[in-house]
């Protein structure tokens, strides 16, 4: 009974804010920006745990070696020139055991310096590789560190990476480097405990962790992060003297804070939900910049395939057949978030429609459940011959109004087929920092993946990336999906340089994914940004590189 009361109170707050409070007028002299974000990072280490809120904050303070820009083109951020086979920055070679490999040489910016004045060097890149390569470090992106068998500093600003296979993305080094002068000793003392002792979490405001336009000067867990300009930044000076990222986990409260002027903008990464943004646009759109950016954000439900019920593919297929995802997209999102059939977005050039499509078909779902042995109905819930109840649990991030609403719709539709589904949600920092990353969810976990263009799903679908104590929970295959054909396809995609051949491999990946259903695809998200009219320079990319990667271009309209 508490939830409707809470919704009513929050609705009243929003109404009062709309009636009596207006965003403060801005002038060219405005030098503070307050950003609303719905999640607080579980860690500030850039390479441990995958969480969008962390990426959003850290992108204002650091730069990866390379990245995809808003035009979906690969560019240098920390390097001076993108190395290619054509310009000699990359060369084919044989590995020590005679395999076909490649050496890629990156020239780092000579003017890059950590916030404490120490130079950013090739030795930092080598250290980052050493940390990632250690099996107990808990770092994500395990395949990069396994494949890159040697990294050498040729001089202070030149680093050469040797890989044991030639991939189509051989020069994509989206590596977020670590400060060797701060973290090397900590890592070497106890690699297995490094993730708990890193300077990023024990001394988050240390300026030596950052070399971007801003650095972090204040952190209040679960509440806010304060950024100020970094004196050692080499690029365009950022406009704002202070940027405050306020964490407001409840999306209705986020809207109220915007209307009251407590925050200036709502980030799309992650901010309010699309349905809320659509309603906000109708009521207040004339007072704000509203951007709805379609992109590579895949909302889905990871299924724990160690669950005895979910091991049966017929159950997974019945779960998706029971859902009317088209109605959810139409009624909740005004059709702006199209139904997903796999994890590959139609915007991506490797997408194919030649796959199984699981449209709403409750009769077929019921037959599959009967066939799987869940045919006895008692008090509206299916049981098997042993008398066991068909009961599952679904989890997501607490306070996200749309996800919680979608959960209730899914629960209702599954219930109509006799599937008992219980809802249990957690704050984002717990859900992502512990439950999902350590595969502690009993059955289903609903969240989103954000990717770059043509991003092979090795970390999420390859069997070697299943998180475990042995790899210190470093993988992202949270479902526990283990299919030898999928493993071979992913490996083949990575090493196929011919685009046409690679596209055929991608098509088979999507067919296999849609058949096996290690996850239930829901929809591709359109990301809403609510910005003040006076703010300039915010350019959504539509992929995993956040807008804050170019925060130095943000400013105030004259």
Image (cartoon, rainbow, N blue to C red):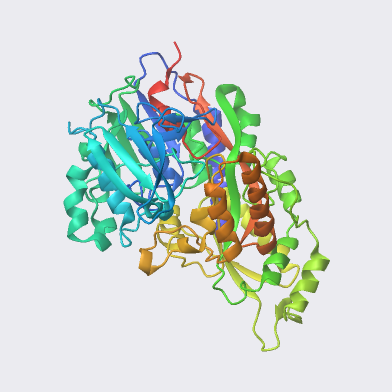
Which quadrant would the C terminus be assigned to in this image?
top left
Occupied quadrant, residue 75: top left
User: Is residue 262 visible to us here?
Assistant: no
Percent coordinates x, y for residue 537 in the rendering: 47, 21
Residue ID at (38%, 55%): 146
Given residues 528 and 50, the one toward you in this image is 50
Q: In the image, residue 118 lies at what x, y percent? A: 17, 34
Toward the viewer: 336 or 530?
336
Residue at horizontal 55 percent and vertical 65 percent from the top: 481
Above or below residue 383? Residue 527 is above
Q: Is residue 500 above or below residue 43?
A: above
Left or right: 383 as drawn, with respect to 451? right
- Residue lying at 44% horizontally and 22% vertically, measured from the top left: 24
Total numbered circles: 0
Q: Is residue 306 left or right of residue 374?
A: left
As drawn, which residue projects farthest toward the right? 363
- Give the position of the N terminus as an image quadrant: bottom right
Residue 122 horizontal/vertical position (percent): 25, 38
Residue 444 location, quadrant? bottom right
Q: At 25% across and 26% down in the image, what residue appears?
A: 110
Compare residues 68 and 227 and report the one nearer the observer: 68
- Quadrant of res 27: top left
Residue 433 image point, x, y percent: 40, 57
Give the camera-side residue of 342 and 524. Answer: 342
Is 270 above or below relative to 374? Answer: above
* Residue 182 seen anywhere in this rendered image of the structure: yes
Question: Outermost residue toward the bottom?
Answer: 386
Position of 448 with respect to 40 (left or right) is right
Tell whether 224 sits left or right of 248. left
């Amino acid at each position: 009974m508490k939830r409707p009361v809470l919704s009513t109170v929050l609705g009243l707050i929003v109404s009062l804010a709309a009636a009596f409070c207006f965003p403060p007028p801005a002038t060219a002299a405005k030098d503070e920006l307050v950003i609303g974000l719905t999640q607080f990072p579980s860690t500030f280490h850039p390479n441990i745990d995958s969480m969008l809120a962390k990426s959003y904050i850290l992108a204002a303070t650091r730069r990866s070696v390379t990245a995809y820009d808003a035009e979906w083109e690969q560019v240098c951020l920390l390097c001076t020139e993108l190395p290619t086979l054509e310009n000699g920055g990359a060369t084919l070679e044989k590995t020590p055991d005679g395999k076909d490999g490649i050496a890629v040489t990156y020239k780092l910016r000579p003017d890059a310096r950590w916030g404490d004045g120490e130079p950013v060097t090739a030795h930092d890149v080598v250290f980052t590789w050493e940390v990632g390569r250690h099996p107990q470090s808990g770092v994500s992106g395990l395949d990069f560190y396994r494949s890159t068998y040697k990294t050498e500093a040729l001089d202070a600003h030149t680093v050469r990476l040797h890989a044991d296979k030639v991939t189509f993305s051989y020069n994509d080094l989206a590596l977020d480097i670590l400060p060797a002068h701060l973290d090397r000793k900590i890592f070497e003392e106890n690699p297995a405990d490094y993730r708990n002792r890193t300077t990023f979490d024990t001394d988050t405001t240390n300026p030596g962790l950052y070399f971007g336009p801003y650095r972090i000067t204040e952190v209040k867990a679960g509440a806010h992060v304060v950024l100020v300009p970094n004196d050692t930044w080499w690029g365009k000076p950022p406009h704002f003297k202070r940027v405050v990222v306020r964490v407001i986990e409840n999306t209705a409260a986020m809207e109220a804070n915007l209307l009251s002027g407590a925050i200036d903008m709502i980030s799309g990464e992650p901010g309010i939900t699309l349905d809320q943004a659509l309603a906000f646009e109708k009521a207040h759109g004339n007072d704000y910049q509203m951007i709805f950016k379609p992109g590579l954000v895949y909302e889905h439900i990871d299924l724990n395939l160690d669950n005895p019920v979910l091991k049966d593919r017929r159950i997974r297929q019945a779960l998706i057949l029971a859902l009317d995802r088209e109605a959810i997209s139409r009624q909740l999102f005004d059709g702006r978030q199209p139904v997903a059939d796999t994890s590959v977005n139609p915007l991506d050039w490797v997408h194919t429609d030649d796959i199984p499509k699981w449209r709403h078909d409750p009769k077929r779902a019921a037959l599959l459940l009967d066939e799987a042995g869940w045919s006895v109905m008692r008090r509206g819930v299916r049981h098997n011959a042993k008398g066991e109840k068909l009961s599952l649990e679904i989890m997501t991030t607490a306070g996200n109004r749309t996800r919680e609403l979608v959960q209730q719709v899914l629960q209702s539709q599954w219930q109509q087929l006799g599937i008992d589904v219980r809802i249990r949600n957690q704050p984002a920092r717990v859900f992502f920092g512990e439950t999902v990353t350590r595969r502690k969810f009993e059955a289903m976990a609903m969240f989103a993946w954000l990717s770059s263009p043509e991003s092979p799903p090795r970390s999420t679908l390859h069997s070697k990336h299943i998180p475990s104590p042995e790899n210190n929970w470093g993988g992202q295959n949270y479902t526990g999906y283990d299919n030898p054909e999928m493993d071979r396809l992913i490996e083949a995609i990575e090493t196929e340089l011919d685009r046409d051949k690679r596209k055929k491999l991608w098509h088979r990946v999507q067919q296999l994914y849609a058949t096996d259903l290690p996850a239930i695809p829901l929809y591709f998200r359109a990301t809403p940004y609510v910005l003040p009219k006076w703010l300039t320079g915010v350019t959504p990319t539509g992929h995993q590189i956040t807008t804050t990667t170019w925060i130095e271009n943000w400013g105030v309209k004259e």
